[in-house]
Amino acid sequence: MTIRRLLKAIRLAGLQEVEQRLNRAYRDVLRSLHLIDRNDPIAEIVAKTVIEIGATGVREPSEISKIAVKRLARLGRPRLEAPTGQEISADF
């Protein structure tokens, strides 16, 4: 499982409560995105996103997964350049 490898690399794998919480959020996000293959490169992006959100102090797996799905959805949207040089998201 991708998230376990990443948690081990950042030495969070031994913290059982944190690992369980992030694993649950990771599974929820994969399910929401209909991803089955955990070796898919997108699964690694999901795992990194879940870990980043968990590191911000969000503790509830359902909240972590909700935030992750929103953040990942923004990655797929085309970006447009605003006249002031700021990026804006395009909602199609």
Image (cartoon, rainbow, N blue to C red):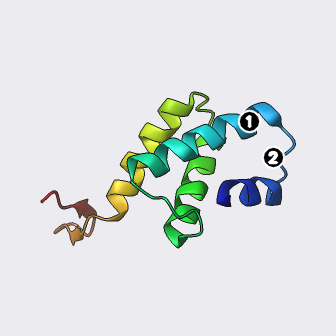
Q: Amino acid at mark 2?
A: Leu
Q: Residue at x 53, y 70 (%)?
A: 40
Q: Point out residue 65 in the picture as x, y percentages from the top left corner.
A: 48, 40
Q: Toward which corner of the image does residue 8 lie, by quadrant?
A: bottom right
Q: Point out residue 61 in the picture as x, y percentages from the top left corner.
A: 56, 32
Q: Is residue 79 left or right of residue 15?
A: left
- Name the foreground residue: 75 vs 8: 8
Q: Is residue 42 left or right of residue 19?
A: left
Q: Residue at x 28, y 65 (%)?
A: 87
Q: Point out residue 77 in the picture as x, y percentages from the top left corner.
A: 26, 64
Q: Is residue 76 above or below residue 57?
A: below
Residue with the most extreme left position: 92
Q: Point out residue 71 in the picture as x, y percentages from the top left corner.
A: 41, 51
Per the rendering, the mark at residue 12 is 2
Q: Counting other residues with Cα less than 10 Å from the Cα at mark 1, is it few (<14), some (14-19), or many (20 or more)?
A: some
Per the rendering, the mark at residue 63 is none
Per the rendering, the mark at residue 18 is 1
Question: Dot 1: what SS?
Answer: helix
Mark 2–mark 1 distance (CA, rounded to whole Å): 7 Å
Q: Is residue 88 left or right of residue 50?
A: left
Q: Residue at x 71, y 36 (%)?
A: 20
Q: Amino acid at mark 1?
A: Val
Q: Counting other residues with Cα less than 10 Å from the Cα at mark 2, is it few (<14), some (14-19), or many (20 or more)?
A: some
Q: Earlier in the sequence, mark 2 or mark 1?
A: 2
Question: Dot 2: what SS?
Answer: loop
| Callout 2 touching callout 1 (CB < 8 Å) | yes
Quadrant where the image shows the N terminus: bottom right
- Name the foreground residue: 33 vs 50: 33
